[in-house]
Image (cartoon, grey):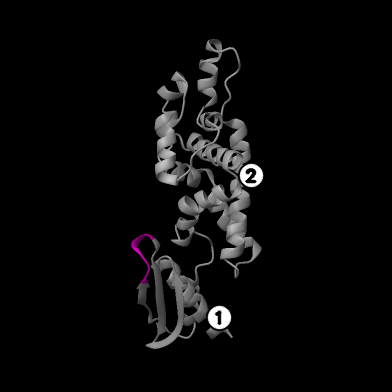
Amino acid sequence: MNALKQHIKDNFNIVFNDDRILIEAFTHASYANDHRHLVDEPIKNLERLEFLGDAVIELFVSDYLFNQFKELPEGQLTRLRASIVRAESLAELATECQLAQFIRLGKGEEKMGGRQRPALLCDVFEAFVGAIYQDQGVESVRRFLRQVMFSKVEQNSFSYDTDYKTALQEFMQQSGVVNIEYTVLETSGPDHDREFTVEVSIEGDYHGVGMGKSKKLAEQKAAKQALEALSS
């Protein structure tokens, strides 16, 4: 428990008020079942916090995408959200946050490699978010998700079906134009919070500029601006 608390404090600047909620978030049903005869009261497992965390994540992701991608229609927002909150994505976040080592598993689940199972890692990530929400409140959840999830969205780590670079290329090819170049004009900010400014030129002429937390995102925004200008 002390190692878990220290890990969370050091990496996410979170100090739980109620250690029991934190323990619950990392207790798998298999562990609770294995130890049910050793305690007077049933051991709580992560399933209820997982239920809560699942809803909390979807709400915060929806709110973030709604405000971050103002140009996207509902269908594309839905698909982008789905790519972020799917089990595989949350399991990867659990791994990146190094949560697996702290899960309390039953012997059978441990032997079957449960600590590496994507579905189980997803459950733990959701339970952890539910625990943060329950113990720390809304803003703490927002800070945590911004650190581990939203920063990856801004780096274009999650895909959705609006690829403005491809759309611009296909649009220009209709006129026989294929020479489209993207140039980084400026890189600003500290290493952990870079911002790129990218210009897109077509046949050597300037057509758009975009800014983003990664070159890919800045290129997408530049392509979007050029496509909108040319289409109009």
Amino acid identity at mark 1 = Glu
Residue 69 placement: quadrant: bottom right
* Residue 63 visible from this viewpoint: yes
**In the rendering, at what x and y percent does residue 181 appear?**
37, 79
Can you say whether 52 is above or below 175 in the image? above
- Residue at (45%, 67%) from the top-left corner? 217
Can you say whether 183 is above or below 190 in the image? below
Q: Which residues are magenta?
A: 188-192
- Image depth: mark 1 or mark 2 in front: 2
Q: Residues within 10 Å of mark 1 (few under 14, many from 20)?
A: few
**In the rendering, at what x and y percent does residue 171 appear?**
50, 79
- Residue at (56%, 83%) from the top-left corner? 231
Can you say whether 232 is above or below 214 in the image? below
User: Which of the labelled discs sits on residue 132, or is there none?
Assistant: none
Residue that label 2 marks: 55
Residue 29 placement: quadrant: top right
Residue 195 within the segment the image draws in magenta:
no
**In the rendering, at what x and y percent does residue 155 appear?**
43, 61
Which quarter of the image is occupied by the N terminus?
top left
For label 1, the SS is helix
Amino acid identity at mark 2 = Ala
Residue that label 1 marks: 228
